[in-house]
Image: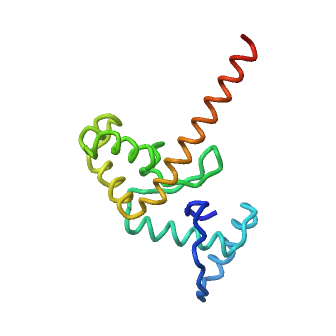
Amino acid sequence: MSYMTETSAPKSMQRSFRLSAATADLLDRQAARANDSRNALADRLLSEGLRRELHPLITFRTGAAGRREPYLGVSRLKIRQIVASLQANGGNLRETAELFELPISDVEAASSYYAEFASEIDADIAWAESEADEEHKRWQREQSAFA
């Protein structure tokens, strides 16, 4: 799925592009490997590529839970983690940078990305909080099963 929240169903528009044979072949092979349609893969790659043009320090990866999310560069930090910390610190960039031991420019990059795609990052934060709650409940059940 492209990096869009699962709750939003973006309108699609018909466009026609010419691709080189090599690019079309790569697209076909990757779509087959990912068990995805060419259109869905092309949409995701184009969306992420355009976002990277606008926000060069942001990358996209599929995490352990199978969700595709924006990350800060090549770090393991998800943008949602930095934004949640910024929110907890009242938007203080310097404090957040110190917490993660990052240059302030990296926190500014995450903040800039959030300013443009806030609803998506807010949905990521809500999803992560829900998953953490479920994980805690599962742990509690396991503890009580052996008590």
From the top left corner, tell me how far across and down residue 79 is, in percent.
43, 50
- For the residue pair 24 and 71, the one nearer the viewer reads as 71
Residue at 66% over, 71% down: 40
In this rendering, would 60 be left or right of 83? right
Question: Which quadrant of the figure has residue 25?
Answer: bottom right
Which residue is pictured at 42% across the width and 57% down the height? Answer: 58
Above or below: residue 92 compared with residue 1: above
Quarter placement of the C terminus:
top right
Task: Give the percent coordinates (x, y) of residue 82.
Answer: 39, 45
**Residue at the top extreme of this rendering:** 147
Q: Is residue 92 left or right of residue 86?
A: left
Residue 29 image point, x, y percent: 72, 68
User: Quadrant location of the N terminus?
Assistant: bottom right
In the displayed structure, 56 sits above or below 89; it is: below
Quadrant housing residue 45? bottom right
User: Which residue is pictured at 34% across the width and 40% down the height?
Assistant: 88
Instruction: Give the image location of residue 60, x and y in percent.
Output: 51, 56
**Identity of the residue drawn at 60% across and 89% down:** 16
